[in-house]
Every structure is written in C-alpha cells, then in structure tokens.
Image: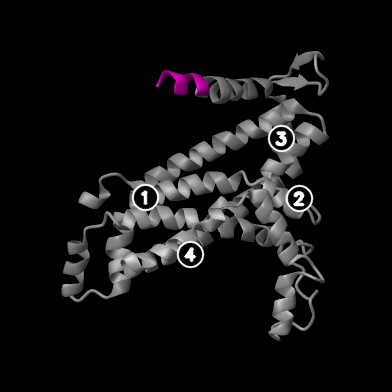
C-alpha cells in the first residue's frame, strides 16, 4: 500500500493542505509576488458576495435535480434489468455506453441538440406538432430553464452508473424474502417500498453520495454549453471558483470559496450516510 499512500499524499493531501492554507492569504496572480496574511477576510468576502450566494443556490438546485432524476431513472432501469434476468445482458451493455463518452464531448453534443433555431430536439418537436416553431423553446438561452437544460447531458451520461450500482445491489437481495412477501399477498409497490428499497439503503447511500459530489462539482459539461450564461443562470460554484482564480486573478478568494465548498460537501455526505444508510437498520 506504500506506493498508493505516497501517490495520494503527493497529489491529493498536500495540494488540499496548500489549498486551505492559501485561503488565509491575499495572493497576487503573478508568480513570485508577495503574499499577505489576511486571516478570515477572504471567507468574509466570499460569504458576503452575492455571486457566491447565487452560485451556491444554483449548485444545490442543479445537484438535487440531477441526482434525483438519475436515481429515479436508474432504479427503474435496474429493476427492469433484474426482471429480465439473463435476457438483459445485451441491453445492459448498450446502456453503459454513455459512461465511455467524455463530458466535454457530451456537452458539445447536447449543445448542438438543444441550441436555438436549428437544434435537432426543437426540429423534432416541431415536426411532431408539439411546438409551433423551432425557436419556441430556448433551452440554452432562457435563464429560467437553462440550468435544467445543461443538466440533461449529465443525466444522460451517468444514469448508467446509478443503474449499474443499484443493479449490483439488487442481485444481493434474497429472493426468498420477496417471494414470501408475494405469498403473503403483498403487491409490487409494497414489496418495492417496504423490502427492496430498505435493503438497498447502503447501496443507495453510496450511489447518491458519489453522484452527489460529482454533480456538485459539474464544470466541463456546463462550460462547453453555456459558459455560465445566460445572465449567469448556469454559473455554479465550480465555474465561479474557476473564474475567480483565472479570470479575476484572486487565488486567495478562490481558495476560500473552494474550502467552504469542500466543507459543505463533506457535511452533506456525512448527513447522507447517517440518514440513508443507517447501518443495522435492515436487521431490525
């Protein structure tokens, strides 16, 4: 384990420590410039920033929407694959293909699908008579729906991951428990919510935490589609921290924002483990 420990120390632990350390300084963007210790001033500026507050809300909405949709779709598909048994092998293979696509490629693909005026999605909706003209729904230029539109590629990409995790968990549920419930007259909705989902708690906790953290730091998919627009409606914390660091030239403030971001995700992950997993609940 020593090589892995050294790798993590060099490329994860030390950058993380340095990142938090930098948040207490005012740092010039120019290499070799002086650093000034400012204590918690960067954190005060971050919390008082309207841009940081708005980006935090958008990140929370984006994360909840993406994870909720992926969980619902992933659970439905996992249950379908379980019901099909060995007949689902080919479908499972095909369903995993989006995981092999780079997020930048997926973002670029969906940008062309959803772009105004000549996007393929609006053209198909127009041909089907659902909308009257191709620019009626402005997926990426309407501030009211742009945040949910840029979430579509993320959902399309990683629903397969949720499906894979939940499908693996379903294989470990004892069949005799479900069979006994059916013999007792329990209908499928009762079996699903009273037996299957409670027994899947640990698997669900892992899937939601991993995907929640990944969705909360969404960057490339949004950047390639809207670059945070229109009117900042898709500027999440990752984009804001990136701009603060590179465009506005304030590494200290960016580090403070990132540290707060990290602590919040850590707290949410712990809370999710305590609320969803509840180790030992299945034995009671």
User: Does residue 224 appear anywhere in the picture?
Assistant: yes
Sequence order check: which comes first, mark 4 or mark 1? 4
Sequence order check: which comes first, mark 3 or mark 2? 3
Picture quarter containing residue 85? bottom left
Q: How many neighbours does mark 2 have within 10 angstroms: few (below 14), some (14-19), or many (20 or more)?
A: many
Q: Secondary structure at mark 2?
A: loop
Q: How many neighbours does mark 1 have within 10 angstroms: few (below 14), some (14-19), or many (20 or more)?
A: some
Q: CA distance from mark 1 to mark 3?
A: 36 Å
Q: Residue beneath label 3, please?
A: 46
Q: Which residues are magenta?
A: 1-7
73 relative position to 150: left or right: left
Name the front one of labels 2 and 4.
Answer: 4
Q: Is residue 122 above or below residue 255?
A: below
The residue drawn where x is 80% and y is 13% is 34
Name the front one of labels 3 and 2.
Answer: 2
Sequence order check: which comes first, mark 1 or mark 3? 3
Q: Residue beneath label 4, please?
A: 73
Sequence order check: which comes first, mark 4 or mark 3? 3
Name the front one of labels 1 and 3.
Answer: 1
Q: Secondary structure at mark 3?
A: helix
The percent position of residue 176, horizontal first and vertical second, equals 17, 63
Q: CA distance from mark 3 to mark 2?
A: 19 Å
Q: CA distance from mark 1 to mark 2?
A: 33 Å
Q: Residue beneath label 2, please?
A: 228
Sequence order check: which comes first, mark 1 or mark 2? 1
Q: Residue beneath label 1, please?
A: 203
Q: Is residue 4 magenta?
A: yes
Q: Secondary structure at mark 1?
A: helix
Q: CA distance from mark 4 to mark 3?
A: 36 Å
């Amino acid at each position: 384990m020593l090589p892995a420990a050294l790798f993590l120390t060099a490329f994860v632990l030390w950058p993380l420590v340095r990142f938090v350390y930098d948040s207490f300084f005012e740092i010039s963007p120019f290499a070799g410039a002086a650093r000034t210790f400012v204590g918690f001033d960067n954190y005060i500026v971050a919390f008082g920033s309207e841009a940081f507050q708005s980006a935090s809300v958008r990140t929370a909405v984006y994360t909840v929407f993406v994870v909720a949709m992926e969980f619902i779709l992933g659970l439905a598909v996992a249950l379908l694959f379980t019901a099909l048994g060995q007949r689902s092998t080919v479908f499972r293979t095909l369903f995993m293909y989006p995981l092999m696509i780079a997020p930048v490629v997926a973002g670029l693909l969906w940008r062309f699908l959803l772009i105004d005026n000549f996007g393929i999605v609006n053209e198909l909706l127009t041909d089907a008579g659902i909308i009257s003209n191709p620019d009626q729904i402005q997926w990426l230029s309407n501030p009211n729906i742009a945040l949910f539109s840029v979430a579509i590629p993320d959902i399309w990409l990683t629903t397969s991951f949720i499906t894979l995790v939940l499908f693996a968990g379903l294989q470990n549920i004892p069949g005799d428990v479900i069979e006994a419930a059916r013999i007792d007259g329990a209908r499928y909705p009762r079996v699903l919510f009273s037996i299957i989902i409670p027994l899947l708690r640990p698997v669900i906790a892992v899937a939601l935490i991993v995907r929640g953290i990944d969705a909360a730091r969404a960057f490339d998919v949004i950047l390639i589609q809207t670059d945070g627009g229109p009117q900042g409606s898709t500027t999440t914390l990752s984009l804001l921290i990136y701009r603060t660091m590179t465009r506005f030239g304030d590494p200290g403030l960016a580090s403070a924002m990132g540290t707060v971001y990290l602590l919040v995700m850590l707290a949410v992950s712990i809370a999710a483990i305590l609320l969803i997993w509840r180790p030992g609940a299945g034995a009671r």
